[in-house]
Image (cartoon, rainbow, N blue to C red):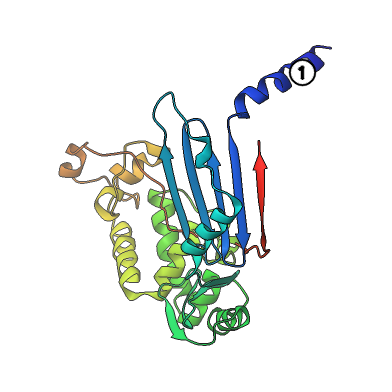
């Protein structure tokens, strides 16, 4: 009985919460626009088929509203055309994504691999997908694959395992990490970058060599560490190789900041239907 009364109370209150909110939306093969009108504001959200978004909001004066400001379906369609008339085509799969402009120019990026592939071709969804497959393939890139091709798998794994296990969060399940999509895990991303770029590889090597030479996390790794953070007190403030203690100068310097986990940028299907709809809530 109490449950029924609570439900009835919700029904009684909900019109008070939503009665002053109205929406109108329209959609075409170029994208979708949605207008939301409340007693406080009128907002517009347009998402074009290539992923580009346009957002605007108008706040009404306190104590006043403009119910007539909600656009008609025809006005919504006109707004959609204005905002998305130059929208290109976006296509993607697990390996990457491409943006194809109406003039045929495209830009494609493969997940986990730096750089953009550009060119020109035919303006169509099929051409976009064909270009994507040609450039990035159909399978997600993994650290194991790219490192094996580059010839630095064992080297980069040893560098990054040493740095993380000594100064950051210990790596668990390295084989799973190596076989995961390159952009799905920060460690796989680091290993992939180490294998792809000599600059990153040299940085990791310098940190690795420093730690191997009885250095400390604070002196070897380019980030601050705190005493005892995540059980890394010995690594941050004493001899990490276990062959003595840190220098007197290092021991005297107790200033440090909290440790942070390593981070990397990580990183979808368009809707195609014509017509408009109006919804009053």
Image point (27%, 55%), residue name:
220
Q: On the image, numbered disc 1 is attached to which residue?
A: 8
Quadrant in the picture for the N terminus: top right
Q: Is residue 270 above or below residue 35?
A: below
Residue 148 vs residue 11, the one in the foreground:
11
**Residue at (58% x, 70% y) in the render:** 92
Of all residues shown, which one is farthest toward the bottom?
121
Residue 138 screen position, x and y as percent = 62, 77
The answer to whether residue 179 of the structure is visible from this angle is: yes
Number of residues whose C-alpha sits closer than 10 Å to that of mark 1, classed few (under 14), some (14–19) or many (20 or more): few
Pick the residue in front: 85 or 214.
85
For label 1, the SS is helix
Image coords of residue 56 (percent x, y): 43, 48
Q: How many marks?
A: 1
**In the image as oriented, which residue stretches furthest toward the front?**
68
Q: Look at the image and tell me whether residue 184 can be seen.
A: no
Between 74 and 223, the residue placed more toward the observer is 74
Q: Is residue 109 above or below residue 123?
A: above
Q: Nearer the viewer, residue 74 or 178?
A: 74
Measured from the top left, where is residue 101 in percent x and y? 48, 77
Q: Is residue 43 above or below residue 159?
A: above
Q: Which corner quadrant of the image does residue 15 belong to?
A: top right
Q: Residue at 21% x, 40% y: name it.
A: 251
Q: Residue furthest left?
A: 249
């Amino acid at each position: 009985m109490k449950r029924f009364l609570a439900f009835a109370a919700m029904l009684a209150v909900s019109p008070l919460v939503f009665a002053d909110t109205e929406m109108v939306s329209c959609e075409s093969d170029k994208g979708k626009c949605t207008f939301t009108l409340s007693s406080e504001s009128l907002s517009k959200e347009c998402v074009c088929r290539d992923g580009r978004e346009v957002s605007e909001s108008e706040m009404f004066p306190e104590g006043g509203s403009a119910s007539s400001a909600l656009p008609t379906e025809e006005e919504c369609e006109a707004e959609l055309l204005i905002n998305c008339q130059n929208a290109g085509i976006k296509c993607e799969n697990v390996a990457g994504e491409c943006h194809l402009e109406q003039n045929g120019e495209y830009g494609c990026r493969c997940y986990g691999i730096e750089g953009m592939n550009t060119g020109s071709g035919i303006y169509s969804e099929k051409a976009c997908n064909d270009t994507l497959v040609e450039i990035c393939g159909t399978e997600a890139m993994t650290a194991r694959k790219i490192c094996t091709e580059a010839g630095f798998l064992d080297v980069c794994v040893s560098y990054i395992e040493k740095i993380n296990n000594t100064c950051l969060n210990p790596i668990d399940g390295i084989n799973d990490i190596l076989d995961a999509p390159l952009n799905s895990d920060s460690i796989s991303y680091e290993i992939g970058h180490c294998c792809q770029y000599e600059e990153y590889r040299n940085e990791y090597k310098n940190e690795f060599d420093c730690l191997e030479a009885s250095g400390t996390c604070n002196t070897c790794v380019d980030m601050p560490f705190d005493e005892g953070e995540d059980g890394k007190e010995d690594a941050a403030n004493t001899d990490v190789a276990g062959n003595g203690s840190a220098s007197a100068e290092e021991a005297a310097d107790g200033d440090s900041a909290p440790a942070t986990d390593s981070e990397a940028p990580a990183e979808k299907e368009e809707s195609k239907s014509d017509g408009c709809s109006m919804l009053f809530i």
